[in-house]
Amino acid sequence: MLSYVTTSCSASKISSCKKYRADEMIDYTTTDVTQKLIENGLIYNLIIGNIGLTPSNLFTAAHKFLLSTSKFIQVGESTSLATLRIFISRILLPRILGGGSSKFKLFSTRNSRGDLGRIARWVLEGKVKVLVEQVFEYEDAPNAIELLKKGRSASKIIVHVTNK
C-alpha cells in the first residue's frame, strides 16, 4: 500500500519526522497548517489529530483536504467541559451551522487492564513503536515533570519507579 504522509512539527523535530518516513513536514511555528493542507488539495485519506484541539479550524476545514469517504480521528485530549463541548459539536453540529462535514471519530483509551493490555500486545507485535525522548530515575522525577510541562515533547518521557 502506497501512502503519502504529511505531518506538522516544529523545525527542531523535522529530522525525527524524516527518520520515521514522513513525506512532508509542515513547520507549525512558521506556517498555517490548515491553509497548507488546503493548498495541497483533496488528497488525504485520513487525518489524525494527536496534539489536542489545535489548530482550532483543522476539523471544520477538513472537507477542503480530506477525501469525502475518509475520516478525521482525534486521539485523546484532556477531559473538561470545554473539550466535551467541542467533541459533541464535531459529532453533531452540521456544516451549515459551523460544524465540519468530515466523519469524526474520537480515539481514546481508558486506564483499564483490557485497553492497556491491547496496546502492550501491539507493541510486542511491532504494530506500535514507542518513541522515548528521555528516561529519568525516580529521584529525578521532578525534572521529568518539568520537561512534560513544557509541552514540547515529541515522544514518551519515562520515569523508573522501581529497580529491576
Image (tube, rainbow, N blue to C red):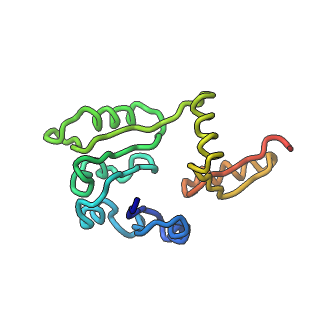
**Which percent across, then down, holds residue 61?**
24, 52
Name the residue: 34% across, 35% down. Answer: 87
Q: Is residue 2 above or below residue 107?
A: below
Tell me which corner region of the image, top left, top right, bottom left or bottom right, holds residue 66.
bottom left
Nearer to me, 111 or 130? 130
Q: Quadrant of the N terminus?
A: bottom left
Q: Is residue 60 above or below residue 42?
A: above
Nearer to me, 59 or 18? 18
**Which percent across, then down, holds residue 59?**
29, 48
Residue 28 horizontal side relative to residue 125, left or right: left
Residue 99 horizontal side relative to residue 105, left or right: left
Residue 121 horizontal side relative to residue 86, left or right: right
**Which percent across, then down, holds residue 138?**
79, 45
**Which percent across, then down, holds residue 73?**
38, 44
Name the residue: 46% across, 40% down. Answer: 77
Q: Residue furthest front?
A: 1
Name the residue: 44% across, 46% down. Answer: 52
Nearer to me, 154 or 122? 122
Q: Quadrant of the C terminus?
A: top right
